Amino acid sequence: MCSLPLVFRNINTKKLTHNYIYRSLVYSSIHYDGKSDPGPLFFNEEVQSLLKLLTRIDYNKVFRKRKLGTKLLTKPDYQFMTDEQLKESINRARKKADVLLQIPPVVKVKEINPTILSKDSALKGLLTSKIVFTDITFGVQNADRIIVVRETDGTLQEADWQLRKRINQTYFPENGRLLKPPTMFQDTYLENLLDREEHEFVLDRACIQFDPDEPEYQRISSITYQHINEKNLFHLLRSTRHFGSLVFFLVWNKNIDNLLLDLIETSNVNEAAQLIALYSKIHNTEFDGDTVLEKVESFTKSASNKKGALELAIQAYKEVAKSKEQLEKGVNAAHGITEC
């Protein structure tokens, strides 16, 4: 039996206390913590394909200048290329865009219930602070790393979530992640950032600071998604890596009416059909209709929370489409073009 390299540290319990204000703004914190695990559905190939299509890739936005704060701007590099070289360069840019638009995984909240390993009353009062024992074996996943705590009353138990994160970050630091979460995630500051439409910045920072299965990550992301949905600010996340997670969150919670309304009002009916298809896939239901609009109308009648607004939007779209068709026929007739 090989011995494990263990490291122990004295931990002052006061330093582990984070005085957060969890008002959750005016929104309730929504976690993926029910009986159903969203992971298998999220990683389904058909679901991933629909989420990417709904992201609506705009390369100008994907490769735009961003305020990273750590890198200096460089001068643009202009090159003369043959058609073959240009084609290769475009392919490289598309592959890079696929990496930049990789959707953060959607998984169920991981529950950690520390197991009590032993109780030694003889040690009670001997220590004034906790002692943490950590397996620092190289190559072990942080989630699987053995971390146990000797309490001041002599109890030896597994470390809770917050302590595990702090110890793992101490011995195996991840770039950009802080030992103590930034104050920007406290509700007072988070509300200010959302009002300033810094949703992408908030989500990017949350991805660095937390893991997708942490309750705090899902609290922050769910509040951000709800704010976007309520204010109809979908354009802020479109063509970013977070739009797919936003759509999945709305579909999972059966709250796609605002997004569907936005797609119809902007004449993106094909994307509306893709959204309905995603809803059908996740909730295992079907909507009648042979055409795109018929399926949207079927959803509106049977599953919508904003039936009146969607019906008006569909009617307006039909009228606009009819006017465009008549105009196109008039232009073609003026130019002597007849339909076959």
Image: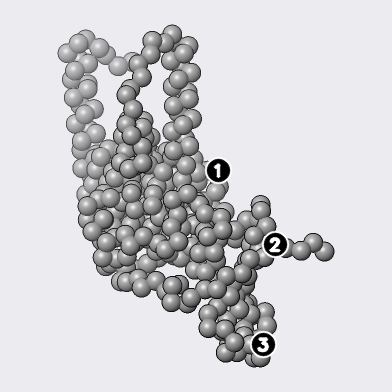
Q: Residue at x 57, y 84 (%)?
A: 127
**Horizontal side of residue 211 vs 304, given as left or right:** right
Q: Nearer the viewer, residue 121 or 233?
A: 121
Displayed quadrant of residue 90: top left
**Horizontal side of residue 241 vs 224, given as left or right:** right
- In front: mark 3 or mark 1? 3
- Kindly state the secondary structure of the residue where label 1 is placed: helix
Q: Residue at x 59, y 87 (%)?
A: 126
Residue labelled with disc 2? 5
Q: Is residue 225 above or below residue 19?
A: above
Q: Residue at x 47, y 42 (%)?
A: 102
Q: Is residue 214 above or below residue 242?
A: below
**Horizontal side of residue 240 vs 35, given as left or right:** left
At label 3, the amino acid type is Asp
The quadrant in which the C terminus is found is: top left
Q: Nearer the viewer, residue 53 or 179?
A: 179
Measured in 3D between alpha carbons, the distance from the residue under mark 2 to the one under mark 3, in whole angstroms, is 24 Å
Which numbered dot is residue 120? 3
Residue labelled with disc 1? 45
Mark 2 or mark 3, which has the lower sequence index?
2
Confirm or deny contact between disc 2 and disc 3 (CB under 8 A). no
Measured in 3D between alpha carbons, the distance from the residue under mark 2 to the one under mark 1, in whole angstroms, is 41 Å
- Kindly state the secondary structure of the residue where label 3 is placed: loop
Mark 2 or mark 1, which has the lower sequence index?
2
Could one spot residue 292 in this view of the protein? no
Which numbered dot is residue 1? none
